[in-house]
Image (spheres, helix red, strand yellow):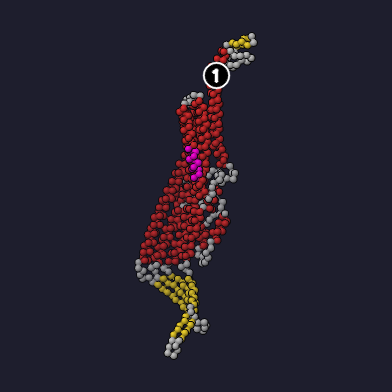
Amino acid sequence: MVSKAGGKYSKLRSPRWSPLRKKKGLLSKKEVLSFILCLPCYVSCLSILKLFIKNEMSRHMRKISLLTSPVMLALSLAMPVSAETLQEALVSAYLNNPQLEAQRASVRATDENINQAASGWGPTIAATGSYSRKTTEGSSVFSPSNKLTTDPRSVQVSIDQPLFRGFQTVNSIREAENAVKAAQGGLADTEQDILLSAVTAFVDVRRDESVVELTRNNVKVLRRQLEASEDRYRVGEITRTDVAQSKARLSRSISERTQAEASLTASRAAYQRIIGAMPGSLSGGATLPPLPKSEQEAIEIAKQESPVLASARYSEEAARNNVNKQYGGLLPQVSLNASYGKAWENFNQSDQTETRQVTAQLTIPLYQAGAQSSRIRQAKQTEYQRRYERIAAERGVKAGVQIAWESLREATARIKSTEAQIHANEIALEGVKQEAEVGARTTLDVLDAEQELLDSRVSNVRAVRDQIVAAYQLLRSVGRLSARNLQLPVAYYDANDDAHRNSYRAYGWGTGDVEAWKASAN
């Protein structure tokens, strides 16, 4: 094609090179026609180039995002910036949980049973006093009226000392001591429950935070995917169905994000209920505690150290002591009583009476209308109950160890499986995207691959959480989930020391020792 310009002919390279002339002059009709015919080609080429650049940038940005998101999550877990660690959460729960505080108070109340039982050894001293005004009026033949007023007064001090009560005092003290040990076992089990709940609350918040982050990133990825699908639809590369599939998958991802955020809110509320404060920036992943090397070793440790078994055994022993105590109600009772008293008829000190008395008393039960026999039968049935409860506790502890061991093994295997699944899904997603660019895969294939990658990552996060909870559950089952065994940096509450300190107190009603412990612990 040639055109005339300035009296000379100049050959155009191609309408695609430039539809305009380099030199001044008007375009010919052929050039204008060529430009009009080539205009759709220009527009199509520009659209394809724009879409290619956008897809390439989006693909690389998604790769960067997918690669950096786990790294950023890991870095955020390790950042020590004014964040709350698992150890700090456990300390807070140990000191401030109201359920644990209530159980400690219950044990201290049970401690007082020892004092009440030991009171059977000691005397009972009482003092009484009375004062009255007495007026007597009368008449006779020789004296028409006679009025006499007196002011009788009296004081008395008495001492009652039991000498023999049919061994009831001895058995009452033994029963109280075993009941205290059973209550201490219950307190240790409650402490384990609270610490396990604290661990669970901590890792639940961490899990839900990670799931929320993953779902939010997935929403961003699917939103970009939808934009790319709409661009490709405008240039005719894909159909309307592909765009609809992208929209549907985005809506599903938004719903999953909302569910994850709701779960996070619930986990934060549970954290506040157990720990006593809303979680801030939780830092540091929960590590696995030292655990038994085998299931059989865990069972043997549980038989020796489980507070549940200890509580059941002491409860059975206390019930046996109660049976012996009730038998004592059929034996003779011996006591000694001494009293001293004074009485005055009026204010005249010479008109007084002084009394001194010492009495030894022997009481032999002959017939009690069947009441004491009924108490003995009742105590025996209670002993049977405690015996079967101890057997049930032994079976329950063994089953708990086995369940916790299998849960830990399953969670550990699931972590390895999900890690391999994540790696395979990442490779599969990249391959599906490349095949989709050349038309070998559909939009639905890409969306499915992205969803499978998200599901595997969420499954991995949940498997890590389940492994940690199962490990601490195993520690609880064997009886080693305590503040002392975890070496928490806190003043430990010693219920046994508190029982010794409060036992056999002859007087006083203060609780200053408990208040002092709270002050030192905080």
Left or right side of 130 for 20: right
Q: Nearer the viewer, residue 24 or 371?
A: 24
> Splitting the image into 4 quarters, where does residue 168 fall?
bottom left
Residue 156 among those drawn in magenta? no
- Give the residue drawn at x 50%, y 65%: 504
Q: Main secondary structure of the magenta part?
A: helix
Q: x, y percentage for residue 426?
A: 50, 32
**Position of the N terminus by quadrant:** top right
* Residue 455 in the image: above or below residue 6: below
Q: Nearer the viewer, residue 388 or 6?
A: 6
Q: Is residue 401 visible?
A: yes
- SS assignment at label 1: helix
* Residue 410 in the image: above or below residue 139: above
> Splitting the image into 4 quarters, where does residue 3 fall?
top right
Check disc 1 and give the amino acid type: Leu
Q: Residue furthest bottom?
A: 142
* Residue 507 in the image: above or below residue 61: below
- Give the residue drawn at x 42%, y 74%: 361
- Give the residue drawn at x 39%, y 57%: 385
* Residue 505 in the image: above or below residue 297: below
Q: Nearer the viewer, residue 70 or 249?
A: 249
Q: x, y percentage for residue 293?
A: 48, 45
Q: Is residue 90 visible?
A: no
Residue 266 among those drawn in magenta? yes
Q: x, y percentage for residue 502?
A: 51, 62
**Position of the C terminus by quadrant:** bottom right
- Give the residue drawn at x 51%, y 35%: 219
Residue located beneath label 1 in the image: 39
Residue range highlighted in magenta: 255-267
Q: x, y percentage for residue 289?
A: 51, 46
